[in-house]
Image (cartoon, rainbow, N blue to C red):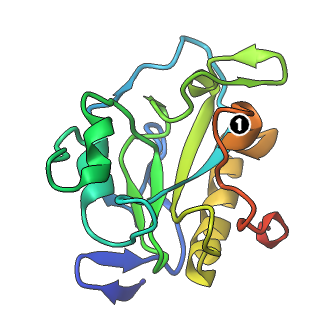
Amino acid sequence: MTKAKAGSVKPAGLTWGDEADGLVREAVQIPSPNQDDRPEGMAVDLLVIHFISLPPGQFGGDAITALFTNTLNESAHPDFAGLSGLRVSSHFLIRRDGSLIQYVPCARRAWHAGQSRWRGRSRCNDFSIGIELEGCETQVFDAAQYETLNLLLPLLKARFPIRDVVGHEHIAPGRKNDPGPTFDWARLS
């Protein structure tokens, strides 16, 4: 691993720390309370890619982690007011520098997809893993983010029977637009 910046680590490779629970050893672990058990016997076969920035279009800082851990100060920025009471999470966040944070073990259900549908099945949180990229729809994603994503995807595919990698926009069309037009699907390995 190489040091990316204070408080974050850009992984040089990814391995399972606890494969049964789905904890990635190289990810910074920050548990989110916004998770629960998957339905019994539910196979994880979908990866959903999102983008997030808080405030919108601004990168860095701790607002995303605060949102995912229910500690966001809604009065800290005008754009946070509408987030009051929102209970969301994701399994992973890939920062602009490629550093990786894990909020929810892959064996558990993160609350990332909301009302969603894929291949005739609703409630995509039940059978998916959510990966947030720090970004927005108007800026291209950084090369370091694709590098980390391309380390994470094969690790997940080797552990779970993944059939599809899609965007939030594909499972919630008309409601969500991420990862959006600046995400380069051809860069996924």
Q: Residue at x 80, y 41 (%)?
A: 164
Q: Residue at x 76, y 38 (%)?
A: 170
Q: Secondary structure at mark 1?
A: strand
Q: Residue at x 54, y 26 (%)?
A: 114
Relative depth, front residue between 100 and 89: 89
Relative depth, front residue between 91 and 73: 73
> In the rendered image, is residue 1 in sight?
yes
Density class for disc 1 (Cα within 10 Å; few <14, some 14-19, many ≥20) is many
- For the N terminus, the image quarter is bottom left
Q: Residue furthest top?
A: 40
- For the C terminus, the image quarter is bottom right
Q: Is 67 left, or right, of 102 in this rendering?
A: left
Q: Is residue 164 above or below residue 153?
A: above
Q: Is 54 left, or right, of 84 in this rendering?
A: right
The percent position of residue 148, horizontal first and vertical second, equals 57, 71
Q: Is residue 91 above or below residue 115?
A: below
For label 1, the residue is: 46
Q: Which corner quadrant of the image does residue 88 belong to?
A: top left
The percent position of residue 15, horizontal first and vertical second, equals 51, 62
Q: Is residue 161 above or below residue 29?
A: above
Q: Residue at x 62, y 18 (%)?
A: 123
The percent position of residue 67, horizontal first and vertical second, equals 29, 45
> In the rendered image, is residue 31 in sight?
no
Q: Is 139 left, or right, of 88 in this rendering?
A: right
Q: Residue furthest front?
A: 78
Q: Report the number of discs.
A: 1
Q: Is residue 34 above or below residue 185?
A: above
Amino acid type at mark 1? Leu
